[in-house]
Image (spheres, rainbow, N blue to C red):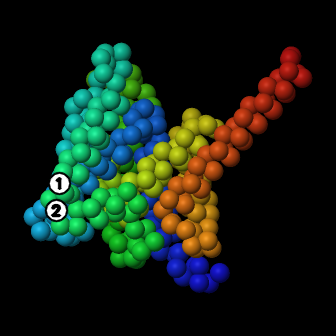
Amino acid sequence: MSDMLQVMAAPFAACMVLVAMLAYLGVHIIARGVIFVDLSLAQMAALGSTCSLIFGLDSSSATGYAFALAFALLGALIFATTRVRRERRRVPQEAIIGIVYVVASAAGILVADRAPQGAEAIKEVLVGSILWVTWPAIGKMLLVYLGVAVVHWYLRHRFLTISLHEDEAERQGWRVRGWDFLFYATFGVVITLAVPIAGVLLVFTFLVVPAVVAFLFTRRTGYLITISWAASAIASAAGLAASFRFDLPTGPLIVCVFGLVLLAAGGARWWLTARGTRSRGLNPG
């Protein structure tokens, strides 16, 4: 047990920092119906990181991060400017998100073919290196995420209204595209730091699965975030413990555990619904 705690302490801490930010952002993403936006932004950041290799830069250096962030912000600008009210949309925004993802992926492959260690960089984008994360890296990520959290706390009314009540934001005359860019820009900052540590698969899981679990049980904002964080903490701890016990790849195993948690939550939701239906049938008055 002590060996496991020593080896897995830093990865678990990294998971909790990631969860604290991504589970909250996931509530916005599910409410907005742009489920794959993090994959697209992550791929844009990966494209920027791969491009930095062309110039002989270390993708994990400050300049490498600047390349990745610049491309992520470009993605944020695209998503903000292509936003149209639901009733006026000719093309779903999810289609735009998918196109950006595919083009960025193809461009990343082309750049990687000409960049030193390009193939290795593509692999790291998918699976990350959370098992080898260091405490200084966690500290840096925590400081940046605290800054993002302050922005979101200060602007929570705007962001939550646009995500959960788009029509109300339009009625109040807000410049929704401008607020969207700010939202996606902060999202891009989060993704740019998260992907090198956790990889695209685990980041997507942290973002979407906890929010889906929460939406199965409630629509109240406070409860949504609380349930998301709780589900993430349980799944992360179980995945890390199983990875240590059975010597399996950490990131993919955590993703699979999240799938089991979602399955269990779906079963619990079905049971609660069936129980409520039976209760109403027994007490029709």
Q: Quadrant of the N terminus?
A: bottom right
Q: Quadrant of the C terminus?
A: top right
Label 1: few (<14), some (14–19) or many (≥20) C-alpha neighbours in 10 Å: many
Q: Residue at x 28, y 35 (%)?
A: 99
Q: Residue at x 33, y 69 (%)?
A: 140
Image coords of residue 4 (percent x, y): 59, 79
Q: Residue at x 61, y 71 (%)?
A: 246
> Disc 2 on helix, strand or loop?
loop
Residue 238 can be seen, yes or no: yes
Nearer to me, 209 or 148 = 209
Amino acid at the residue labelled 2:
Ala
Q: Which mark is residue 115?
A: 2
From the image, tell me which residue sits under label 1.
111
Position of 55 relative to 275 (above/below): below
Quadrant for residue 150, please give it.
Answer: bottom left
Position of 10 relative to 110 (above/below): below
Left or right: where 214 falls relative to 194: right
